[in-house]
Image: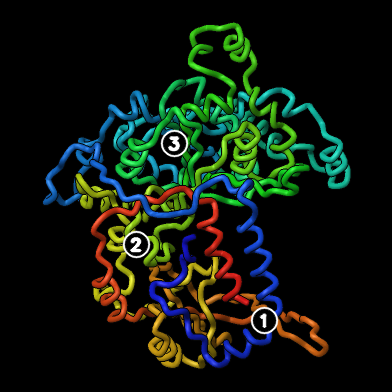
Amino acid sequence: MMRPLLALNSPAPQVKSLSRRLLANKTAITLTITIYLLLYFLRSEEEQTTPPPNFSPFETTSSFHSVPQDALFSDLSIQSLCESFPHHLTQHRIQPVLKMGHGEDPLKRHAQLQSVSACFSSDDLLIVSDMNERLTLGNNASYRAIDIIAHLPPEAYTSISYLSSFRSFLTREPLYPELTNYQTMRLLQSAGNLTRENDPTTGKDGWTLDKWKFLAEVERTWELRPNRDWYVFYESDTYVVWDNMFRFLGAMDSSKELYIGSPSLGIYEFSLQRGRLRTMFGNGGPGFVLSRAAMEKLLGVSSKEEEGSDEGRERERRPGFLSLKWLDVIRSECCGDTVLGWALWKEGVTLTGLFPMFNDYPVHGVPYTERMWCQPVLSLHKTSPEDMMELWRWEQGRREVERPLLYADLYEFRAPGSSKHASIRTDWDNTDWNRYEPVHDVAADDLETCTKACEQDPTCFQYMWRGKERKSCVLMPFISWGEAKKPIKETVRSSKWGKWWTWSRDEAEKTTSYTSGWLTGRVEKWKEEHVCTEADWLSPSLERYFYLIIVLIIIKL
């Protein structure tokens, strides 16, 4: 079983005396959580759906045509950069499907179509959305977005569940506000009055509508582009390394029912044989892949039906049949990728988990560690428009025929902690704090104390000092870039054991500034000691991502 993806080096982190005392007081709760999580992941063999994770090194070759490596890729036109693109793969075997929404930030859509998706012709790329519209770009490229919400069954608007009806009565809101917003948007569009200011599908409202798109996009994609070997579904802020994706899919068998992505916890299933079982789904953010066989299983179709059988023709007369089948689940769940994972699970198609090749992190938040260092990068999530366009041009100059792009290569995009950058950045957060906290706090009244604390910890490669009223230090056993962050007021939560083993929590607002630092010498030495001689293609695992979470929870406590 793979050890947790946590530290760059062994031995384990040495916690300072203050942290050691805090941890000692929390031994009981730490052990309780650890035992619970371990029992979940070490359940019976009957419930294990994937083999133990390991590395599977194999040779791959790029499908892209060779290009001169001395070119200045930042200055070349998109047309020039796309001359090497292997269009033969997307015309017959691999179908890219880009999901977006009309209410999304236009900069996100523009950046996606000017970078990651720029080399697809309008016939190659299928764009699904909540509005039929023509997307015209500055380089005269033009794409058509297809409204897949329009193909939902009428029952989505009219059929009422008791729970939804009761909730609507209590809140005095429409039964399905996201669909009401969609209808309002359509009316404004048809009247010629739709603007970004009055669009009811922007922001959070667009996100709630998004859950209706997942099953709809699968059904509509098969209708428009049936019988492809592979279907790659991704979103406006997904960065896909197509060279690696083509290499990876070229080694897989599309006749097998494969559902591939980054695993996330899904819906519980209850059965007499196995009790309560938590299913898994592929997170939609970093994208997911369905094989032809998986699409056929989910949709209940086959190549013979497409030739004109009665069952195939009947299904064509019933648009939205897949959403209708899982209508109650769509309404009760927050997210469409959860619903899709559940529908596939019920059809007998389980997730093939391939984190971190399908990675939930944005490029600025990737925690570079020994475990992922020599692994290929297939996709990243939450990529900013600026990073997406810059990274795409950078990638063109890094492509090698016999070697996929590894995380060790991706590190060089920003090269955090290297001699290329200053070792300290003010108003900067290199912890990606909104996700997980694989760190331990050390009391520090100033930046110098925080720097020394990192230097004295052999597992520390970078740190972040939270100044002003907060005055605390965060040490990190990985390398990451981070992002700019101005001083803010934030709610600080603390907890402690009281008398008679009572547990209390306190909250206080404190102004916090952020200063990040790296131990450049230690980072450079570690890089020299970790040279990748081959690509570590991972075998599937649904547990790999969550072993990390177990350790992070323990450390946070």
Image mark count = 3
Disc number lying in front (3 or 2): 2
Instruction: Inspect this view and state whether residue 35 appears.
Output: yes
Q: Residue 555 placed where, x, y %?
A: 57, 76
The kind of residue tagged 2 is: Trp
Instruction: Inspect this view and state whether residue 79 appears.
Output: no
* Alpha-carbon span between mark 3 and mark 1: 45 Å
Q: Residue 469 placed where, x, y %?
A: 58, 87
* Alpha-carbon span between mark 2 and mark 1: 33 Å
Q: Residue 356 placed where, x, y %?
A: 44, 55
In the shown orientation, is residue 32 left or right of residue 93? right
Specify the label residue 142 is tagged with. none
Reading the chain from its start, which is encountered first: label 2 or label 1? 1
Eyeballing the image, is 363 above or below 524?
above
Dot 2: element: loop
- Residue nearest the viewer, comparing 318 with 252: 252
Dot 3: element: strand
Quadrant position of residue 55: bottom left
Question: Residue drawn 33% across and 25% down?
Answer: 91
Specify the label residue 27 is tagged with. 1
- Residue nearest the viewer, comparing 246 with 380: 246
Question: Residue drawn 63% across and 46% down?
Answer: 46
The residue wearing badge 3 is 232
Dot 1: element: helix
In the shown orientation, is residue 2 left or right of residue 193? left
Eyeballing the image, is 416 above or below 357?
below
The residue wearing badge 2 is 373
